[in-house]
């Protein structure tokens, strides 16, 4: 350490004067009740302002669209509808098939105890068609569509396309 410059030695002495923390986490300072209340109030105000701004933009954009003053390409709308609907059917089909197989296996094991194995087909058919089919389709399509939109928005953010759209207005 003797070959270090004088400024670096001074910095090293200052750093060694403080104890080393065991964890890598920041030490949280105790704040008063009023400070916490003010922080939460400001956070609530910012979130409310953001939400109201979004609702207002959606409202005025919808008005412009229904009055015919907004322009959008109908071809893009149909492409998005196709991405959300028919392109999601293969994953829905696969997951429904797998859940049906599991339901058949578990149902067969339980119905075997009572000697009612002949009702496995009814259990799977009615259970999937009446009860689980619509709910599973809705959940899977919502999850797949939401993930697809989130990934598209993420790639747009990385490529700075969103900033360009904000700049254009």
Image (cartoon, rainbow, N blue to C red):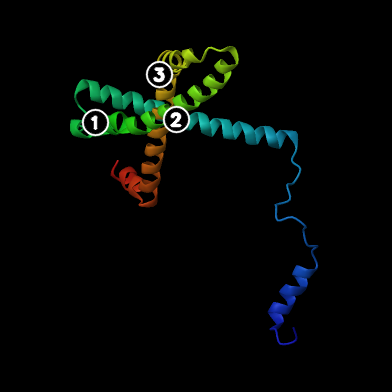
For the point 37% across and 37% down, which residue is it?
A: 149
Residue 61, above or below 149:
above
Is the C-beta separation of discs 3 and 2 under 8 Å? Answer: no
Which residue bears the numbered disc 3?
A: 134
Mark seen at residue 1:
none
> Residue 15: x, y in percent?
75, 68
Classify mark 3: helix, strand or loop. Answer: helix
> Residue 97: x, y in percent?
41, 28
Residue 85, above or below 27:
above
> Residue 136: x, y in percent?
44, 23
For the point 74% across and 74% down, which residue is it?
A: 12
* Closer to the camera in the image, 57 or 93: 93
Is the C-beta separation of discs 3 and 1 under 8 Å? Answer: no
Classify mark 1: helix, strand or loop. Answer: helix
Which residue bears the numbered disc 2?
A: 98
Mark seen at residue 77:
1
Figure quadrant of residue 61:
top left
For the point 51% across and 15% down, which residue is it?
A: 117
Is the C-beta separation of discs 2 and 1 under 8 Å? Answer: no
């Amino acid at each position: 350490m003797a070959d270090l410059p004088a400024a670096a030695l001074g910095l090293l002495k200052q750093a060694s004067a403080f104890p080393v923390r065991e964890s890598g986490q920041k030490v949280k300072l105790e704040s008063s009740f009023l400070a916490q209340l003010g922080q939460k109030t400001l956070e609530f105000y910012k979130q409310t302002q953001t939400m109201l701004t979004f609702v207002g933009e959606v409202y005025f954009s919808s008005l412009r669209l229904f009055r015919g003053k907004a322009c959008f390409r109908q071809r893009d709308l149909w492409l998005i509808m196709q991405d959300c609907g028919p392109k999601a059917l293969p994953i829905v089909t696969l997951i429904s098939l797998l859940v049906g197989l599991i339901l058949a296996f578990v149902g067969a094991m339980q119905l075997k105890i009572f000697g009612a194995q002949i009702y496995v087909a009814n259990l799977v058919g009615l259970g999937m068609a009446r009860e689980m089919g619509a709910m599973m389709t809705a959940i899977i399509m919502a999850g797949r569509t939401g993930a697809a939109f989130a990934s598209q928005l993420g790639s747009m953010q990385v490529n700075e396309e969103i900033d360009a759209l904000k700049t254009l207005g």
